Image (tube, grey):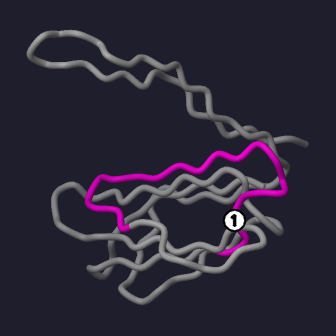
Amino acid sequence: MSITASVNGNLKLTDNLSGDTSFLKQLLLSYTGTVSSFAQSFLLGTSATSINIPSTSAQFVYIRNVPTTFTSDVTVTWTPNGGTSSTIVTLGPGASIILSETDTAYGITALSLAASVVNTPIEYILLS
């Protein structure tokens, strides 16, 4: 059985004053794997919470800090395949991050998340 995670759309930079488009790129980020893990409304605490990787490594990772009505940051820490753990980004309200690798030699082998406010809802998708 296979599972595909994909992001389709356009990345476009437009000058709002002149209306000129200076950059237009069609996006197709996808990975087909065999095992996935996801949550649409996972309540995160202020202590670092480990999120289980569905296999030895995840090649497609999507994480979103859901709230836009209150201020809560989400710190994303992960370990790249063959690397060491480090803080990757702090997501502000409504922000997200996507990692889309094409080869199982890459991806992440560990993931932890921590919020600045208790019960911060997040959503995520991991695909291996």
Q: Using the image, determine if residue 47 lies above or below residue 102.
A: below
* Image quadrant occupied by the C terminus: bottom right
**Magenta stretch: includes residue 65:** no
Q: Residue 119, located in which quarter of the rendered image?
A: bottom left
Q: Position of residue 19 (x, y in %)?
A: 17, 10
* Front residue (pair 46, 80): 80
Q: Position of residue 60 (x, y in %)?
A: 67, 50
* Image quadrant occupied by the N terminus: top right
- Residue 75 is left or right of residue 71, and the answer is right
- Residue 120 is left or right of residue 41, and the answer is left
Mark 1 lies on a secondary structure that is strand
Q: Using the image, determine if residue 26 lies above or below residue 70.
A: above
**Magenta stretch: includes residue 109:** yes
Q: Position of residue 78 (x, y in %)?
A: 59, 72
Q: Residue 7, located in which quarter of the rendered image?
A: top right
* Front residue (pair 66, 61): 61
Q: Residue furthest left?
A: 17
The boundaries of the magenta stretch are 90-110
Q: Position of residue 24 (x, y in %)?
A: 42, 17
Q: Amino acid at mark 1?
A: Ile
Q: Using the image, determine if residue 74 lies above or below residue 68.
A: below
Q: Which residue is mark 1?
A: 108
Task: Tell me which residue sits at (35%, 77%) in the image.
Answer: 115
